[in-house]
Image (cartoon, grey):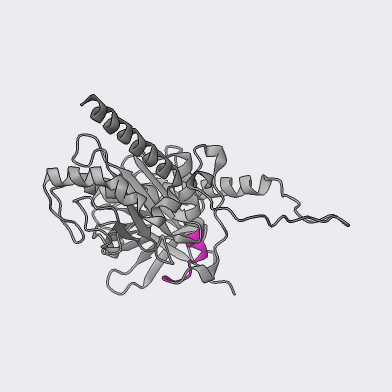
């Protein structure tokens, strides 16, 4: 029997459940028709994704025992409907294992809790829709027949081996029509972490496609070709900060069960903001699994790192305090540092070419200045 993977998308520790009268008008349900001061049940709500399906689970606050569950088939249906007179209340359709159904009202004391639930439900189905589009697109691509025809032979010329230069290496794609195909995951390649679950492979592949189609300003990221659980990112220092002109290389190490758990975050290039090669404690990192939201993507993680980097007044494990002058010195030295890192040169080969051109221009400028003197 195949293993079923569940992802908890949202937890709200207090939800109110109400018995509601039958719907008698075309104007939709109204919370004003309910006895809001006397809920019929109070407990915990969890929004859980089971593979492609989604369901609300109502559970006892203390024991975690299941009270009822409500599967949601999609957006805009009768399974999950917001009332017409309030943003804090919804109508859901409960369904037991025997197939019996009942409509009940649910609501929250805090309007932000209802907002979180509504957004989490919509995000799930939007993500599922995009995944389906990608699978359809992949299936429609013509298959290449690389097999030999009868009687066909091939001649291999084992000439003199030459040393490849950096310019021979493939450049990362710059067009959304050139989405790079990741090498199939080979489990023997992944030695420092557990083998990725199918859900992790699918989600990270999807996040990578989103990064290619909708690039982040001043941030580039790629997974290792041999290990989809390890990503390397490059942040261009923000203008009007001490990091301006710097190129900061770091890495994300994802758990085998991503997105159910957060990644470890590292900064490798010295910046004066982070201790190099030490895990950074952020609310989006593995230091705080209790605050992690599985709906967060690789893009949102990278934006969070950049935001914390620029907020030099916040301190945490893995961060450091230095003067602005020291940060500017690190920014100037970042190119030379990165060029000495073989992993950086392999992953970001296009930037290596750019850095070399910058160095050549600076050398030419220095020679011109000496000649003028």
Magenta residues, dominant SS class: loop
Q: Give the image quarter of residue 244.
A: top left
User: In x, y percent, where is residue 51?
Assistant: 51, 61
Instruction: Identify the image quadrant of the C terminus.
Output: top left
Q: How many marks?
A: 0
Q: Residue at x 51, y 41 (%)?
A: 173
Instruction: Identify the image quadrant of the N terminus.
Output: bottom right
User: In x, y percent, where is residue 182?
Assistant: 54, 54
Compare residues 41 and 177 and report the one nearer the observer: 177
**Relative to 155, is 126 on the left or the right?**
left
User: In x, y percent, where is residue 134?
Assistant: 57, 47
Residue 97: tell me if it is visible: no
Compare residues 88 and 167 and report the one nearer the observer: 167
The answer to whether 187 is drawn above or below residue 223 in the figure is: below
Compare residues 289 and 249 and report the one nearer the observer: 249
Q: Residue at x 71, y 46 (%)?
A: 142
The answer to whether 73 is drawn above or below residue 332 in the figure is: below
Q: Residue at x 30, y 51 (%)?
A: 337
Q: Is residue 196 magenta?
A: yes
Farthest-out residue, top: 372
Segment colored magenta? 192-201
Residue 281: tell me if it is visible: yes
Q: Give the image quarter of residue 360.
A: top left
Compare residues 331 and 24 and report the one nearer the observer: 331
Q: Residue at x 60, y 50 (%)?
A: 135
Q: Give the image quarter of residue 185.
A: bottom right
Farthest-out residue, right: 151
**Relative to 31, is 51 on the left or the right?**
right
**Relative to 127, is 318 on the left or the right?**
left
User: In x, y percent, where is residue 137?
Assistant: 62, 45
């Amino acid at each position: 029997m195949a293993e079923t993977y569940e992802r908890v998308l949202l937890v709200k520790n207090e939800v109110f459940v109400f018995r509601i009268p039958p719907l008698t008008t075309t104007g939709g349900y109204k919370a004003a028709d309910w006895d809001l001061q006397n809920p019929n049940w109070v407990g915990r709500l969890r929004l859980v994704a089971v593979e492609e399906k989604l369901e609300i689970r109502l559970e006892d606050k203390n024991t975690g025992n299941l009270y009822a569950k409500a599967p949601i088939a999609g957006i805009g249906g009768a399974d999950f409907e917001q009332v017409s007179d309030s943003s804090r209340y919804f109508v859901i359709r409960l369904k037991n294992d025997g197939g019996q159904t009942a409509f009940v009202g649910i609501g929250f004391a805090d309007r932000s809790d209802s907002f979180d639930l509504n957004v989490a439900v919509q995000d799930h189905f939007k993500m599922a829709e995009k995944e389906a589009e990608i699978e359809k697109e992949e299936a429609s691509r013509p298959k290449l027949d690389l097999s030999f025809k009868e009687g066909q032979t091939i001649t291999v010329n084992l000439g003199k081996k030459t040393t490849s230069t950096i310019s021979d290496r493939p450049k990362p794609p710059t067009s959304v029509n050139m989405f790079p195909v990741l090498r199939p995951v080979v489990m023997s390649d992944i030695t420092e972490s557990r083998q990725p679950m199918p859900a992790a492979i699918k989600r990270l592949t999807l996040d990578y496609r989103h990064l290619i189609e909708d690039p982040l300003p001043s941030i580039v990221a790629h997974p290792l070709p041999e290990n989809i659980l390890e990503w390397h990112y490059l942040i261009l220092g923000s203008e009007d900060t001490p990091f301006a002109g710097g190129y900061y290389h770091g890495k994300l190490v994802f758990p085998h069960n991503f997105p159910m758990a957060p990644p470890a975050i590292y900064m490798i290039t010295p910046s004066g903001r982070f201790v190099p090669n030490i895990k950074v404690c952020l609310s989006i990192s593995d230091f705080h699994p209790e605050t992690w939201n599985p709906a967060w993507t690789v893009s949102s993680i990278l934006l969070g790192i950049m935001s914390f980097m620029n907020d030099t007044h916040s301190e945490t494990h893995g961060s450091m305090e230095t003067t602005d002058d020291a940060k500017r010195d690190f920014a100037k030295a970042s190119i030379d540092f990165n060029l000495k890192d073989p992993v950086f040169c392999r992953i970001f080969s296009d930037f290596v070419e750019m850095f070399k051109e910058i160095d050549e221009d600076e050398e030419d400028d220095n020679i011109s200045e000496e000649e003028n003197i």
